[in-house]
């Protein structure tokens, strides 16, 4: 496995502490022999623990190894995957490197752990290859990511070679994109180690425009403006106003759900975070998506510091 991973070109930007690298190191030690059995088993269980942790976080089940490998392909942001996001496959020499990498992932998908299990008298690999997860509420895991990754894993399982995986993965990048922006609909602004970061919101309400009754004129204007926006045409900033509970936030969520497939994403930002807008825009400006910057509970008094800051930003 280690020799296979060392040949990756496009997808070689994985951290050395990743589960894949650690498993590759374990397999290398096993193949070379001369290992201390108890120590090697301990290393295996450490990585199985990490695999279970990420599987719980994203709601993976059945073949956790396949889900993990598909997760890598779905989330790995590199020049190839970012170029393909929301566009799909394009002609270029880089495709040869991509097919080579996908051929390696095909062999990783088919990797046989049975010899190691037999020699070490363990069964953890058999368990993760046919894993039945405890049913969880959607709020407890990233359902949006889970559903897409599990479908991608199933498609790759049926692939014959690297060229078929190339078609599957580039189509996935075209439909959803790649990384956090590809797999998630909405984000919130957080500060981590003095940096402004966009944190995915695990699950968004599955509200549809048809669920909003009695706002036909407002919905029509909102739909027309959003369609112009996602199509790259001129569009306006929108101000939704009204009493609490009249459907302002619900309308935005419904618009997001309807146009997510066309590359629409939402970033939720609060008044006290307006100063972070320039950092937010810097993170998204070169990605192939359309972003709604969603500001709730605005006030337009001149003495409001946050209002003055936001007005300056948009000028």
Image (cartoon, grey):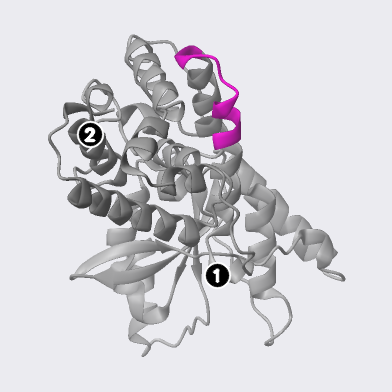
Question: What percent of the width, then of the height, locates residue 70?
Answer: 47, 37
The mark closer to the camera, 2 or 1, is: 2
Cα gap from disc 2 to disc 1, whole angstroms: 37 Å
Q: Nearer the viewer, residue 42 or 258?
A: 42
Question: Height in image: 104 above or below 18?
Answer: above
Residue depicted at 37% across the width and 52% down the height = 48
- Residue that carries the numbered disc 2 in the rendered image: 30
- Residue that carries the numbered disc 1 in the rendered image: 140
Q: Left or right: where does residue 60 sit relative to residue 304?
A: right
In the image, residue 157 lies in the stretch drawn in magenta: yes
Question: What percent of the width, then of the height, locates residue 44?
Answer: 29, 48
SS at circle 1: helix
Residue depicted at 27% across the width and 65% down the height = 196
Find residue 106 and report its image quarter.
top left
Residue depicted at 44% across the width and 27% down the height = 84
SS at circle 2: helix
Find residue 91 and report its image quarter.
top left
In the image, which residues are magenta? 153-163
Residue 315 appearing in the image: no
Viewport quadrant of the N terminus: top left
Disc 2: CA contacts within 10 A as few (<14), some (14-19) or many (>=20)? some
Mark 2 and 1 residues: CB-CB less than 8 Å, in contact? no
Q: Which label's residue is closer to the chain start, 2 or 1?
A: 2
């Amino acid at each position: 496995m280690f020799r296979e991973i060392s040949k990756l070109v496009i997808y070689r930007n994985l951290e050395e502490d990743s589960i894949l690298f650690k498993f590759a190191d374990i397999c290398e030690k096993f193949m070379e022999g001369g290992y201390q059995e108890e120590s090697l088993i301990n290393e295996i269980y450490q990585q199985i623990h990490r695999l279970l942790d990420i599987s719980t976080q994203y709601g993976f089940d059945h073949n956790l190894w396949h889900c993990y490998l598909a997760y890598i392909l779905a989330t790995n942001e590199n020049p190839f995957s970012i170029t393909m996001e929301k566009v799909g496959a394009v002609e270029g020499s880089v495709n040869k490197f991509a097919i080579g990498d996908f051929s390696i992932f095909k062999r990783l998908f088919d990797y046989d752990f049975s010899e190691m299990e037999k020699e070490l008298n363990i069964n953890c690999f058999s368990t993760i290859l046919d894993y039945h997860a405890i049913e969880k509420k959607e709020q407890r895991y990233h359902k949006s990511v889970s559903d897409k990754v599990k479908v991608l894993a199933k498609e790759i399982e049926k692939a014959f070679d690297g060229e078929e995986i190339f078609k599957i993965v580039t189509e996935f990048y075209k439909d959803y994109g790649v990384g956090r922006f590809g797999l998630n609909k909405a984000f919130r602004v957080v500060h981590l180690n003095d940096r402004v970061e966009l944190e995915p919101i695990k699950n968004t309400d599955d509200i549809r425009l048809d669920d909003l009754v009695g706002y036909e004129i407002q919905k029509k204007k909102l739909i027309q403006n959003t369609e112009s926006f996602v199509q790259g045409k001129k569009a306006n900033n929108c101000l939704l106003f009204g009493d609490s509970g009249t459907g302002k936030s619900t309308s935005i969520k419904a618009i997001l759900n309807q146009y997510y497939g066309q590359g629409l994403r939402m970033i939720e930002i609060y008044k006290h975070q307006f100063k972070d807008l320039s950092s937010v825009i810097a993170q998204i400006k070169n990605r192939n998506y359309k972003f709604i910057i969603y500001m709730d509970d605005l006030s337009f008094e001149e003495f409001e510091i946050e209002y003055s800051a936001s007005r300056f930003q948009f000028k």
